[in-house]
Amino acid sequence: MDSLSRCLEELVRIDSTTGKEQRIADYVEAKLAGFGLAVERSENNIIAGTGSVMLAGHLDTVPPASLGQLIPKVANGRLQGRGACDMKAGLAVMLELAQSENATFVFYSGEEGPLPNGLNLLHEKGRLQAKLAVCLEPTNLQLQTACRGRLLTKVTVAGKAGHSSLGSQHNAIYRALELVAKARGLQPMVQAHGGALAVTGIESMGPSNATPTACRILLDYRFPAGATMGEAETFLAHNISAGMEFLDRAPAYSLPKNLSAAFAKHLGPAGVCPGWTDAAQLSGWGIPCAIFGPGKLELAHADDEHVVLKQLELACERLRPLLRSQFA
Ligand SMILES: [Zn+2]
């Protein structure tokens, strides 16, 4: 436990906001080399070890809310600080396991966006090889073997130009608000099916004395793990508006039942990840990937981001048998 929490403290002290991963990559590289592993580095992305199970974690965090977040605070069995749960706790677990287990350890940059994701770079170079993978994003130690998809869409609603003194009803903002109300009304039904629908932006700005001719709405649709991208697009087109622009598409994924059961044997009952993680990417590239890590997703990116230190030890305990199983 001591070495795990000491390692996490050291990781939190290093500011690794996306785009500034060099120092943390140096730290991880030196640690892995110190364990006697052959380390390969490509920019700020690192691969070490040769096992057939890959453990993957991103090095970057969202920016600290204040400089104080770079000073880890330990109290009541918790460690607080930027990245404590998303996902430096997972990185500390990987570094602990790297000392004794045979696995392929992948540490990469640029996960929090908007810069290029280091995992893609390693994939393009053909460097990612494993039979299976575990992505150590925070899941509160709940195994997840499926992931919702994401469809980010923009709807542009048109109005008719005119002098505001006429009070025309052909107002793009009025029409846009009708769609916002529709999206809000759909949410309970979407949620009942395992998805989520949120309006995340609205924009219209013109002369203060004219009826607006355009209003744009952003809709973030997290569709159920069992749905296809085509089904998700059709759902929005039917229920919100036929004229939408799809800005970002990330497919949902579910591991085949037998694989999900094999992970569950070591890591506990399998559930669905509410967000979208690189586990979907890895699975799409032919490396079936589960998500399992210390820390609560609700605390990721939060000002009081923290992790229960005991979870780091438990994560190691549960991952060890998996790395030593017939998978490995
Ligand atoms: Zn993360």
Image: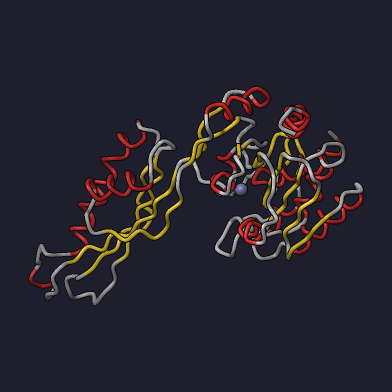
Of 265 and 60, nearer the camera is 265
Task: Mark yes or no: residue 76 visible.
Answer: no
Of 51 and 239, nearer the camera is 51
Quarter containing the N terminus = top right
Residue 103 sits above or below residue 151 on the image: above
Q: Residue at x 38, y 39 (%)?
A: 227
Quarter containing the C terminus = top right
Of 171 and 166, nearer the camera is 171
Left or right of 41 on screen, residue 132: left
Residue 146 pos. (x, y %): 51, 36
Residue 159 pos. (x, y %): 16, 67
Q: Quadrant of residue 204 in the image? A: bottom left
Left or right of 61 on screen, residue 92: right
Q: Quadrant of residue 217 in the image? A: bottom left
Residue 61 pos. (x, y %): 65, 54
Left or right of 22 on screen, residue 242: left
Of 201 and 124, nearer the camera is 124
Left or right of 244 on screen, residue 152: right
